[in-house]
Image: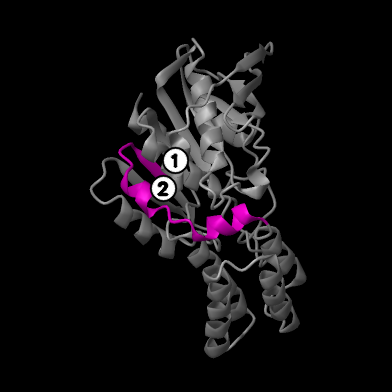
Amino acid sequence: MGFIRCCLLVVAIVAATACLAQDGGGTVTFENASARVTFSGTFYPGTAQPPYPVILILSGHGPHGTSPQSALGRLLNDSGYATLSYDEKRADVLTFDRAGRVDMVSDTEAAIAYLKGRPDVDPKRIGLFGSSAGAVVASAVAAQDPSVAFLILTGMPAEGAAKARGRLIAELARKKGCEQEEIDALAADFRAVIADDGGPADMRRLAARMVSDKLITRETADNLLEQYDTPGARALLTYDSAADLRNLGVPILALYGSLDMQAPPDANIPALLTAVEGKPAVSVIVLPGLDHSLRDAGTDDTPAGNRSRGEPFTGTGVFQAITHWLAAKGP
């Protein structure tokens, strides 16, 4: 919590420009001046009328189809919300680090400040949609910023990323027919790497051993290493969102896919509900047959969890769940 709070105490000076297209949407830029980073995004009013209620879309490790032109963006627009998504230039390194900065949080605060500076936006009706690591960021921002009106979280690793990743590795080994003793040893080795803050070399050795023992595929190992090769990504594995969730006081919709291997609902929903116990208006929905990105799940063993083909957030029941919750929540 300390480094989240420190980050949010930084006052960002935001500069923004916008160029609207004929259909009412257009490219915008805004600056996180404290980090000296300028972002490019797209703002779409959709069917909303000014002053617009807005949903700011935050993705996870990389592009998750969260452009307002995507199916998700169109859904939110058709539900009466304007949308802003932006090119998270630093998202692929997750920019969580141990030096006291949580850059994606300050980036999100800069985006919110940009929206509040628009005369056509209602500053009291800005919500956040966060997926996976984006859900972690969204909860961190809302825990410290009382102006955030609501949260939609998908694949939220409420139990902690390290536990979720260790659980995934164990499940992959189990699928390969490993004995429980071998699975326990593998999980212990993974926990040791995380606990000792081991660098990429330690994880490379562990991944190579798992490939050699045919516990995971080379593709799975490469994916695991890709998500562990920066200080930021490693720090995310040890970051605990429970304190942020306990500090939330806004309506929350949390969606999980029943076949999500990265943030399995049976492990993460109890952690989420424990953290938000007593909070108002918390809805948790498990969507059958969907993966981590809320698509109809495939059968591969990538660490992203059943990484299926198709556009994220288009699985059976996703749109109905979101539109129903938004309508029930009201303005």
Q: Which residue in the protein does label 2 denote?
A: 2
Q: Which residue is drawn at 35% across and 45% down?
A: 283
Asked whether the beta carbons under mark 2 and mark 1 sit within 8 Å of each other, the answer is yes
Residues 277 and 196: in front is 196
Q: Residues within 10 Å of mark 1 (few under 14, many from 20)?
A: few
Depicted 112 relative to depicted 284: above or below: above
Q: What stretch is highlighted in magenta?
A: 230-253
Quadrant in the picture for the C terminus:
top left
Residue type at mark 2: give it: Gly
3D distance between C-alphas at marks 2 and 1: 6 Å
Residue type at mark 1: give it: Cys
Q: What x and y, as percent, mark residue 116?
A: 47, 19
Q: Which residue in the protein does label 1 denote?
A: 6
Q: Which residue is drawn at 68% across and 38% down?
A: 89
Residue 236 part of the magenta-drawn span: yes
Secondary structure of the residue carrying numbered label 2: helix
